[in-house]
């Protein structure tokens, strides 16, 4: 493996997207110029100490290797231009990452014939990881240390991360520590814990989650909504809770991800710290609801009644308060210190707050 630092080179040929058409946005995605912070916010301290930093390449390889930061930076690097598509419904066009293709790095260690998958492990407290089929990783994954001409900030995966073209961004790993070639495929962190789809192709529009997490009897119990404290101990995924009117009005930090909560009757509910990521709350009655610190990333709130609701400190990355002619009612709602609203949604909310 030879290199002399930065050099110019042509990017690889684009993936075949003959079904993409003229629109670069996959289904149900929103364009943004921002680069939102997603996933974990900070790595282990060792990831940021470049004198102690290392990258291990092992598993089903002929010659396992450990690279220091100096070793990595001596490799030839170039630019990759790619669109980012996050599972929480935001997309950023033509981000320029600087680094090198994974295939070039692996050519030096010799991939064994029994390797079928690549597992990437992070410098994180929970050993966050993600996996890809070997053929996908060799064609579509790069290692990157810079974005848009500047070194990657730690919150965005610096000093070194992976980026995988044509997959939701949870298949791109921050704070890369280890590349393991595997003789069998293993699910990554988000797939194991939250039921994210293992393929993660944004273009079909239905590869965010693999499906619901509840059996019919469990779903019926949840729909009755008595004694909701038990549901805080697990993540409920992709449940049909349309028109939900729970008996217990204090669900608190309940986790209802990618759930259908259209027209739910949650006026006055205590939802402090709840995780409603990607849930559909269009038409929901949330008047005077306590949503302080709730995670509403990617949630659909257009048409919801938020009058008098407290959303202080809520995460609203790529959530929608309006969609076309359908808009939330926000009179008297408290949006103090909310984070992540994309540009058009922020302008819409600011205009309504100024008109009060």
Image (cartoon, helix red, strand yellow):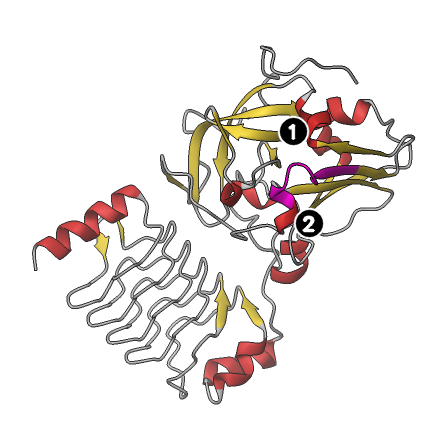
Which comes sooner in the sequence, label 1 or label 2? 2
Query: Which residue sits at x=34%, y=54%?
Result: 339
Place of residue 337 in the rendered image (x, y in percent of width and height, measured from the top left) = 29, 59
Q: Quadrant of residue 64?
A: top right
Please, which residue is most extreme toward the left here? 355
**Label number found at residue 129:** 2
Q: In which quarter of the image is the C terminus?
A: bottom left
Which SS class for mark 2? strand
Please, which residue is most extreme toward the front here? 51
Report the label total. Answer: 2
Query: Mark 1 Cα within 10 Å, few/some/many (few <14, many 20+)?
Result: many
- In the displayed structure, would residue 236 be above or below residue 354? below
Which SS class for mark 1? helix
Place of residue 17 in the rendered image (x, y in percent of width and height, measured from the top left) = 55, 26
Residue 147 lies in the magenta stretch = no
Query: Which residue sits at x=40%, y=88%?
Result: 247
Q: Quadrant of the N terminus?
A: top right
Real-space Cα distance between discs 1 and 2? 17 Å
Looking at the image, residue 142 sits to the left or right of residue 246; the answer is: right
Place of residue 245 in the rendered image (x, y in percent of width and height, measured from the top left) = 37, 81
- Please give the residue where the numbered disc 1 appears in the rendered image: 140
Looking at the image, residue 281 sits to the left or right of residue 151; the answer is: left
Q: Which of 253 and 327 is in front in this view?
A: 253
Residue 219 appears in view = no
Query: Which residue sits at x=70%, y=20%?
Result: 75
Q: Which region is colored magenta? A: 47-56
Circles 1 and 2 in contact, beta carbons < 8 Å: no
């Amino acid at each position: 493996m030879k290199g002399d630092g930065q050099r110019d080179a042509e990017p690889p040929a684009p993936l075949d997207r003959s079904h993409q058409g003229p629109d670069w946005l996959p289904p149900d995605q929103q364009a943004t110029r921002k680069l939102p912070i997603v996933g974990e916010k900070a790595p282990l301290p060792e990831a940021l100490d470049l004198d102690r930093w290392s990258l291990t390449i092992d598993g089903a390889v002929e010659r396992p290797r450990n690279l220091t930061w100096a070793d990595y930076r001596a490799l030839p690097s170039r630019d990759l231009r790619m669109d980012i598509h996050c599972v929480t419904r935001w997309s950023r066009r033509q981000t320029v990452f600087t680094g090198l293709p994974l295939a070039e790095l692996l050519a030096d260690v010799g991939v064994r014939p029994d390797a079928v998958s690549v597992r990437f492990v992070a410098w994180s407290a929970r050993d966050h990881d993600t996996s890809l089929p070997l053929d996908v990783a060799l064609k579509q994954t790069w290692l990157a240390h810079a974005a848009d001409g500047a070194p990657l900030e730690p919150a965005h995966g610096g000093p070194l991360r992976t980026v995988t073209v044509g997959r939701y961004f949870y298949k791109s790993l921050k704070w890369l520590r280890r590349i393991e070639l595997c003789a069998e495929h293993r699910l990554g962190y988000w797939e194991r814990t939250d039921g994210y789809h293992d393929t993660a192709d944004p273009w079909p529009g239905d590869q965010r989650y693999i499906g619901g997490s509840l059996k019919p009897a469990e779903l019926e119990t949840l729909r009755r909504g008595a004694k909701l404290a038990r549901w805080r101990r697990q993540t409920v995924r992709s449940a049909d809770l349309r028109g939900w009117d729970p008996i217990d009005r204090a669900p608190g930090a309940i986790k209802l991800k990618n759930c259908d909560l259209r027209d739910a009757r949650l006026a006055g509910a205590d939802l402090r710290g709840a995780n409603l990521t990607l849930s559909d709350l269009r038409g929901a009655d949330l008047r005077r609801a306590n949503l302080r610190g709730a995670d509403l990333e990617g949630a659909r709130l257009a048409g919801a009644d938020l009058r008098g609701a407290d959303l202080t400190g809520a995460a609203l990355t790529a959530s929608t308060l309006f969609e076309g002619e359908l808009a939330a009612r926000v009179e008297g709602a408290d949006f103090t210190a909310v984070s992540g609203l994309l540009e058009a949604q922020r302008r819409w909310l600011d205009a309504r707050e100024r008109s009060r």
